[in-house]
Amino acid sequence: MGTELAAVVAGARRRAVRDGDRQIDTAHLLHSLLESDPDVRAVFGGPARVARLLGYLVQRSIGYGLRWQGSVEDSGSVPAVTDAEGFSPLAGRALEAACARAAERGERARGVDLLAALVADPDARAVEVLAAAGIEARDVVDGTLWRAGEADGGG
C-alpha cells in the first residue's frame, strides 16, 4: 500500500475512533476516500452528488450508523475474523483486493482501486450508504474502471 492509501486508512481510523466504532468499516474508508482523493470524487460525476454522499456519511456518523456500533461488518461469505489492524472483515478484504488489482497493473493501489473493491460486495456498509444517497454500486464500478483506465492512459 502506497502513501496515498495509507493516508486514507489513517483518516478512516481517526473517524472510527471518533465515532466510537470498534472497527474500521467500508463506510469509514469510503468517507476518507471522498475527503482526500479527487479521482474518487470525479467518479461520482460532480460536486452536487459528492456533497449528497458526504451528507449521508455524516448522518451515518451522528445517527443512523449507531445501529452498526458493536457489530461486525461481514457478508457471511467467509467467517468473520477481527483483523489485528482493526478492520472489519469486508474492509480488510477490500484493501487486499485493491492492492491485488493494482499489482496486476504493476503499480501501487490508488483510491479508485479501493473504491472498486469497496463496492464489490453488496453487503458492504459503503454500498448501503451509496444506496441511501441514490447511487448504484454498479454505476460506481463502471465509473471507477473508466477513471482507472484514464489514469493509466487507456481510457
Image (spheres, rainbow, N blue to C red):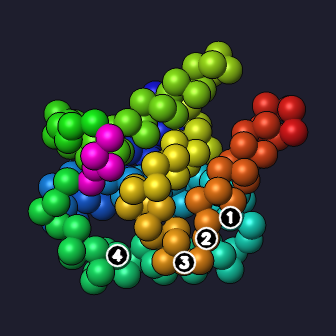
Q: Main secondary structure of the magenta part?
A: loop
Q: CA distance from mark 3 to mark 4?
A: 12 Å
Q: Against 128, is 101 above or below?
A: above
**Looking at the picture, which amino acid does disc 3 mark?**
Ala
Estimate the spatial distance between the alpha carbons at disc 4 and disc 2, rounded to whole Å.
16 Å
The three-letter code of the residue at mark 1 reads Phe
Residue at 45% in and 70% down: 129
Along the polypeptide, which appears first: circle 3 or circle 4? 4
Q: At 73% from the left edge and 53% from the top edge, which residue is drawn?
A: 143
Query: Residue 10's spot in the image, x, y percent?
Result: 35, 46
Query: Alpha carbon of mark 2 to alpha carbon of mark 1: how far?
Result: 9 Å
Q: Is residue 22 magenta?
A: no
The local secondary structure at tag 4 comes to helix
The residue tagged with tag 1: helix, strand or loop? loop
Residue to which mark 3 is pinned: 133
Q: Give the extent of the magenta segment.
A: 73-77
User: Residue at label 2?
Assistant: 135
- Disc 4 marks which residue? 60
Which residue is identified by label 1?
44
Mark 2 in CB contact with mark 1 (< 8 angstroms): yes
The CA distance from mark 2 to mark 3 is: 6 Å
Front residue of 93 and 50:
93
Position of residue 105 relative to residue 129, above or below, is above
Sequence order check, earlier mark of 1 and 4: 1
Q: In the figure, residue 52 lies in which quadrant?
A: bottom right
Packing grade of label 3 (10 A; few <14, some 14-19, many >=20) is some
| Front in this rendered view, residue 7 or 71 | 71
